């Protein structure tokens, strides 16, 4: 009896192994075509897996790579979304690929379809599902950016504040703090913005890039507050550092002209 069960088990395993052999071959062929930049050929072979062997163990991976190709190489967002969502729905998808699929979906919704709320939903799921703490913080930061783009500055500040509280030593923390200040600056609330920037300078003294942006905003606030000499000094400190060189040069040139004229009159 035991011998018979063993033979039956071996037969079932053999049939299953044979069943998986063809979809695996499709998958391998698709990978070779992808490496050779034959994106249409690759996606056809990945789709053969899911069309002919939808219950194969390789189906989730085939859906995943189909979605990646449609997004990155064939510029077909609807098909990319369908394939990536299918891959997520299948429980056999590797956890790392699951999170990556959601990252791609968030990017598609944000950059291709201009649907920030859908992008936010994907990032929120990443924060729930990812085992990588830094990856969770990255999604939190991006959610803040998306709310900022939607004009919901209060919620953007909340997201960046949560990031800072969760891990103030994260590489994203200085940028999150600067962005908090920028939500005040963009509304003309210089007093509140300057207070945040002061915290940025004190808490993250070595983060130069965030300092450059904060100093520029600070100089603008000084300029608006009728303190041109101090504003000009700050702008000049940014020469060779601030990314928008044309804007900085224009600020310095205009202040030098107006401040110089004012000094002559006095």
Image: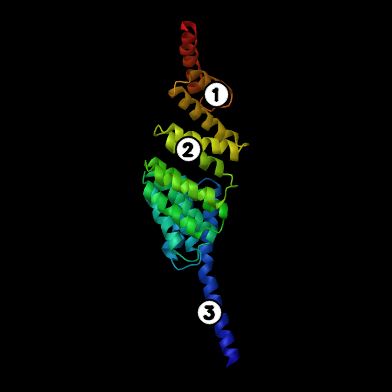
Residue 39 in the figure: left or right of residue 134:
left
Above or below: residue 2 compared with residue 220: below
The mark lying in front, picked from 3 and 2, is 2
- Residue at 53% x, 71% y is 18
Residue 55: image tag: none
Label 1 SS: helix
- Residue at 55% x, 80% y is 11
Above or below: residue 7 compared with residue 43: below
* Crowd around label 3: few <14 · some 14–19 · many ≥20 (10 Å): few
Label 3 SS: helix
Query: Is residue 75 visible to the viewer in this orientation of the structure?
Result: no
- Residue at 44% x, 32% y is 190
Q: Position of residue 255 (x, y in %)?
A: 48, 16
Label 2 SS: helix
Q: CA distance from mark 3 to mark 1?
A: 76 Å
- Residue at 46% x, 22% y is 223
Q: Residue 201 appears in which quarter of the rendering?
A: top right
Using the image as rendered, state which of residue 106 and residue 81 is in the foreground.
Answer: 106
Residue 234: image tag: 1
Using the image as rendered, state which of residue 216 and residue 87 is in the foreground.
Answer: 216
Residue 12: image tag: 3
Residue 181: image tag: 2
């Amino acid at each position: 009896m035991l011998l018979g069960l063993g033979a039956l088990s071996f037969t079932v395993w053999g049939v299953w192994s044979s069943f998986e052999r063809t979809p695996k071959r499709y998958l391998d062929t698709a990978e070779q075509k992808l490496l050779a930049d034959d994106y249409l050929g690759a996606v056809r072979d990945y789709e053969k897996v899911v069309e002919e062997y939808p219950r194969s163990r390789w189906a989730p991976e085939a859906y995943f790579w189909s979605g990646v190709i449609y997004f990155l190489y064939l510029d077909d967002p609807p098909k990319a979304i369908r394939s990536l969502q299918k891959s997520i729905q299948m429980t056999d998808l590797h956890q790392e690929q699951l999170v990556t699929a959601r990252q791609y979906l968030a990017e598609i919704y944000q950059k291709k379809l201009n649907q920030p709320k859908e992008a936010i939903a994907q990032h929120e799921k990443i924060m729930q599902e990812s085992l990588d703490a830094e990856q969770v913080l990255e999604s939190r930061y991006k959610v803040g950016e998306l709310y900022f783009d939607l004009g919901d500055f209060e919620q953007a500040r909340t997201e960046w504040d949560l990031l800072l509280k969760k891990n103030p030593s994260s590489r994203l923390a200085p940028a999150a703090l600067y962005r908090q200040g920028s939500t005040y600056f963009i509304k003309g609330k210089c007093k509140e913005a300057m207070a945040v920037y002061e915290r940025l300078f004190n808490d993250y003294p070595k983060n130069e890039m965030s300092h450059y942006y904060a100093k520029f905003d600070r100089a603008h606030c000084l300029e608006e507050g009728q303190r041109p000499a101090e504003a000009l000094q700050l702008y000049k400190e940014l020469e060779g550092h601030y990314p928008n060189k044309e804007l900085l040069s224009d600020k310095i040139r205009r202040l030098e002209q107006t401040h110089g004229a004012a000094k002559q009159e006095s």
